[in-house]
Amino acid sequence: MEKEKISNNNLKDLGINDVDILVSFGRVASGLLKNEVMSKTDILANLEALINDPATYLFNNDGKFKNLAENVIALRKEGRFLKQLQDEFKLKEAVTDFPVWGAEHIHAGAMAQMRSAVQLPVAVAGALMPDAHQGYGLPIGGVLATTANTIIPFAVGVDIACRMCLSIFDLPAQMIDTETDKLKTMLGDHTFFGMGCTTKSHFDSSLFDSNTWGETRMIRSLRNKAYAQLGTSGTGNHFVEWGELSIADGVLDGIPAGNYLALLSHSGSRGFGGSVANHYSKIAMDKTRLPAEAKHLAWLDLDKEEGHEYWIAMNLAGEYASANHHEIHNKIARALNQQPVMMIENHHNFAWKEKLADGTEVMVHRKGATPAGKGVLGIIPGSMSTPGFVVRGKGDAASINSASHGAGRLMSRSAAFKTLDKAAIAANLIDKRITLMGSDMDEAPMAYKDIHTVMAAQSDLVEVLAKFEPRIVRMADATEKPED
């Protein structure tokens, strides 16, 4: 297999035209890639953010990009390597203030990306959650409100409507220890993971009776793929797991205090959502020309055909993601011969039409962020060996009614493979009594931030109602390439 490379064209796409600068950036990028310090995507994302905001990287803890940042600043003082201003849309010169939760644990790249986002001409407000880390365009954990008739595909995310779903059963949590093999078999029989995996039988496929599947050419072309993948999960950090849910008295309507058997899943809209995201992201970048550092934040106008089409497809992807979870939970509930006493679920890669506290109508993009409006229930997971939490939103206006979507990655996947120790991972899983089915080192607990620190940083955003301790965890096999 040919090794991944970072070409001059990749760097020129970032707005680098000066030969000397091209050489210096290329040397650093190739070195990081060759030594497997970062993935190609992470390297290019960091370089893109550095060009936009080099000063941020002067204080980057790991210092990988410090010299480049110093060079860019020096060149700009000489009148060289200035920001390209010939684009159709320019960013606002002033950076609007935005609140940050858990800032001490957020890397420079995510901060720089958020600064670019709030400089968009259509940006109204922004916020950064404590699990934030770098992504494409908007950082994971970023919340961005734009004018009401605009939507940014890359601020929604590639896995549209990535979602959490929790089923609570009126069964004792001890079943995980007394009937481990039975519960493992259920996961093995009724969960399917991987980029191209499909299922042969469905519990409820009524979503496909909807006329929306015929609304646009793009949706029609993906209907068969979506139908075949109904009830499956992706790769990367997607999972289905049994765990122990601890509930205090009176916090969840109709459920007495106690420890319950619960099923938790995390996945999105599969190949359907990914294809929609890639198709309309390209259209957005072609139609909305932005400076190189912000090109992935290109938006679509809902009043125009392509924006209207994306809005229809995104909302259908949301219904489809929910249906995927329901397929899994319903099949397992049937095998268990028990109906859940409660099901809780939420998206965290989506865009909603909402109003700010002052009544301004906006489009709120939550890319890896959980809706946390006043009284709204949600789920914030940790890692495969750390707890997740059922939460109730407090409706904090500064956060744009949002909270984190998980613990957030502490290190990239490539860094996890390079630095983590298999024996230490195995010892951690034994210590936490975790039975693991599938997965690889890039999803090890040590690759994630401390969920307790993340939750403490957002105590003003959500109230914790219950704690979920994972015990039997099913993820994609190690041979599957991560999608997210």
Image (cartoon, grey):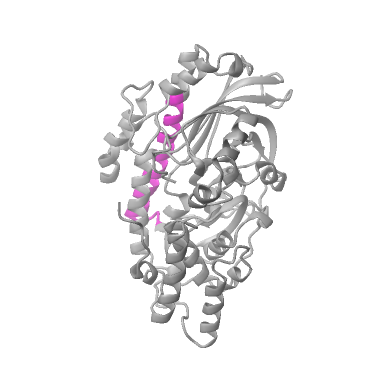
x and y percentages locating residue 49 in the rendered image? 51, 66
Front residue of 205 and 237: 237
x then y, percent, for residue 162:
47, 40
Residue 70 x, y percent position in the rendering? 56, 77
Farthest right residue in view: 249
Q: Is residue 427 magenta?
A: no
Which residues are the magenta region? Answer: 301-328
Q: What residue is at 46 percent from the left and 19 percent from the top?
A: 186
Image side of residue 115 versus residue 149, left or right? right
Q: Identify whether 179 is placed above or below 253.
A: above
**Residue 393 appears anywhere in the view:** yes
Q: Is residue 472 above or below residue 111?
A: above
Outermost residue, top side: 337
Left or right, 452 with reference to 24: right
Q: Main secondary structure of the magenta part?
A: helix
Q: Nearer the viewer, residue 391 or 125?
A: 391
Image: 178 above or below 43? above
> Can the viewer see residue 385?
no
Of residues 247 and 378, the one drawn nearer to the viewer in this rendering: 247
Instruction: Report the side of 205 relative to 331 (left or right).
Output: left
Q: Is residue 325 magenta?
A: yes
Q: How many marks?
A: 0
Residue drawn at point x = 49 percent, y = 11 percent: 337
Name of the residue lying farthest toward the bottom: 78
Residue 224 x, y percent position in the rendering: 27, 34
